[in-house]
Image (cartoon, rainbow, N blue to C red):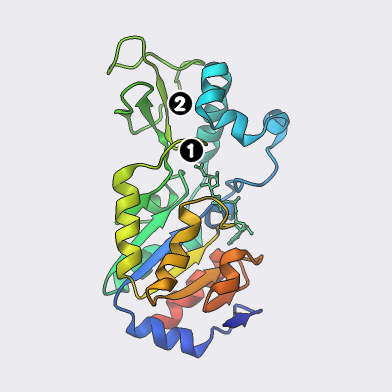
Amino acid sequence: MSELKEPSILPQGLIDHLQLAEYILVLTGAGVSAESGVPTFRDAQEGLWSKYRPEELASPEGFERDPEMVWNWYQWRRELIGRVKPNAGHYALAELEQISQRFLLVTQNVDGLHQAAGSEEVVELHGNILRNICTKTRQAISDEWIAEHPASPPPSPHAKGAYARPGVVWFGESLPEEALNQALEAVTQCDTIIVAGTSGVVEPAASLPYWAKQQGAVVVDINPERTPISDYADYYLAGNSADVLPKLVAALT
Ligand code: OAD
């Protein structure tokens, strides 16, 4: 396993492999959006929300217990995400998709920044924060979040007595089946998986790189800090995704 301290020089073996790669799968986590100003999931909750643990807010129980508080936490996050822009790491992945023979981007992020940067094939394992779905049927209600949403969850048009809730996966909930199946299929077929910005602790996303390695894919992990994925990666590139990803793509073009 090659460990790179300084991302300015990338291992030649990695560049040679990527130039011949036939199917590149990318898995991203909150770290890829960190440089856009979106706090990572395990960053301390800020200010007003610092007294709550994410599990209390991003869970069906939390929503059941206090729908208005959970709704307003998401309003606060949606406001923040409405103001942020993709960073160089997002744009590099959009470019990598264009120059790859076969490519799929699977993200744990719910901020829509990959799509905003031009990525076309994006699998959102944990949903999308700007989407609202019905509390009963899970059907989509709106994909665009409108700033003047009321201070409490509006009623759902899909079912009597149901409300709108953010279209994201909450703690204890299952992942969207279609998204998970797409990710699992890609894991069995890719010859390379590039992991960027994830702590590799939340399943099943955290196991995707391991399963890819099991079938012979080369694993690349990009993260300023080591994670369980770094330990079995073929290449661990210590650095910020907004620095490393553009360098990786530049070396291929
Ligand atoms: P975490 O907050 O757990 O981890 C963020 C990772 O990004 C950490 O390993 C950081 O070291 C790394 N990081 C920070 N800045 C970075 C940068 N500039 N470039 C690259 N990496 C950087 O976020 P996730 O791993 O995405 O699930 O969390 C996975 C899931 O846990 C989330 O999707 C969420 C949460 O439960 C749901 O909401 C269902």
Residue tagged 2: 147
Taking the spot 47% from the left edge, 89% from the top edge, the residue there is 13
**Residue extending furthest toward the top:** 161
Instruction: Decide if ligand 1 comes within 8 Å of the CB at mark 2.
Output: no
Q: Which mark is residue 82?
A: 1
The secondary element bearing badge 2 is classed as loop
Which amino acid, by three-letter code, is at mark 2? Ala
**As drawn, is 28 to the left or to the right of 44?**
left
Count of numbered tags: 2
Which amino acid, by three-letter code, is at mark 1? Gly
Where residue 69 appears, x then y in whole percent? 58, 20
Q: Earlier in the sequence, mark 2 or mark 1?
A: 1
Above or below residue 13? Residue 142 is: above
Above or below residue 171? Residue 251 is: below
Front one among 249 and 165: 165
Taking the spot 40% from the left edge, 30% from the top edge, the residue there is 145
Is residue 119 among the parts visible in the rendering? no
**As drawn, is 205 to the left or to the right of 201?**
left
Q: Residues within 10 Å of mark 1 (few under 14, many from 20)?
A: some
Where residue 230 appears, x then y in whole percent? 59, 70
Is mark 2 in CB contact (under 8 Å) with mark 1? yes
User: Residue 148 occupies which quadrant of the picture?
Assistant: top left
User: Residue 95 occupies which quadrant of the picture?
Assistant: bottom left
Where residue 160 appears, x then y in whole percent? 31, 10
Q: CA distance from mark 2 to mark 1?
A: 9 Å
In the picture, the quarter occupied by the N terminus is bottom right
In the picture, the quarter occupied by the C terminus is bottom left
